[in-house]
């Protein structure tokens, strides 16, 4: 693969294998995604979709292979470091704080600092009585 092609990819998964007690959930998986590209991962139960996402988000470490995001080796980063790079995950079950208003729930999810406490305890902006 040339440097020019590699530089245009935001995500590169190269020969990733994940084994759970001898069972290979992923076996030498290769996947690339260019910057600005949208991809959908589909397949039957047990095909490895969740394991694939777990590798990208750092929840599972592959037995072998490399996972690169914007050229950074994801295997060397913790889950929270990967999250700070901009990799996140949306589960099918919505998770909201029932005690908060819908606006507050949205502000938590959109906070650039990705810190629950800074979102909850910062001074209000754009509301009546606020500067």
Image (cartoon, helix red, strand yellow):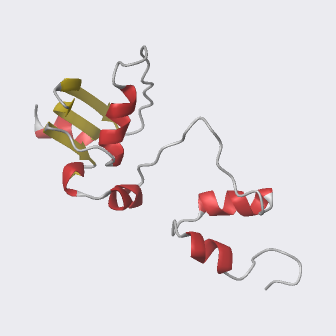
Q: Nearer the viewer, residue 18 or 89?
A: 18
Q: Foreground residue, 46 or 6?
A: 46
* Quarter in which the C terminus is drawn: bottom right
Image coordinates for residue 74, horizontal then vertical, percent: 24, 50
- Residue 13: x, y in percent? 23, 35
Whether residue 38 appears in this view of the structure is: yes
Judge by depth and name the residue closer to the eye, 33 or 119: 119
| Above or below, comparing residue 113 to residue 7 in the picture | below
Q: Position of residue 39 (x, y in %)?
A: 42, 27
**Place of residue 89 in the rendered image (x, y in percent of width and height, measured from the top left):** 48, 44
Q: Is residue 20 left or right of residue 83?
A: left
Among the 4 quarters of the image, the one containing residue 90: top right
Q: Hey, which residue is sitting farthest top in the picture?
A: 44
* Displayed quadrant of residue 82: bottom left
Q: Indicate left or right for 16 with 44 as reference.
A: left
In the image, 36: left or right of 126? left
As drawn, the residue found furthest toward the right would be 128
Instruction: Pick whichever, 65 or 34, lies toward us.
Output: 65
> With respect to residue 46, does 81 lie above or below?
below
| Residue that appears at 84% across and 75% down | 127
The quadrant of the picture occupied by the N terminus is top left
């Amino acid at each position: 693969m040339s440097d020019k092609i590699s530089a245009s990819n935001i995500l590169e998964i190269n020969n990733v294998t994940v084994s759970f007690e001898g069972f290979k959930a992923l076996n030498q998986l290769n996947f690339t995604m260019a910057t600005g590209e949208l991809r959908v991962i589909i397949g039957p139960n047990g095909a490895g979709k969740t394991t694939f996402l777990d590798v990208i988000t750092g929840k599972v470490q592959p037995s072998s292979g490399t996972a690169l995001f914007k050229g950074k080796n994801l295997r060397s980063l913790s889950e929270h470091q990967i999250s700070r790079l901009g990799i996140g995950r949306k589960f099918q079950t919505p998770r909201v704080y029932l005690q908060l208003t819908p606006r507050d729930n949205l502000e938590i999810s959109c906070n650039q600092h990705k810190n629950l406490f800074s979102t909850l305890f910062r001074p209000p902006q754009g509301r009546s009585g606020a500067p």
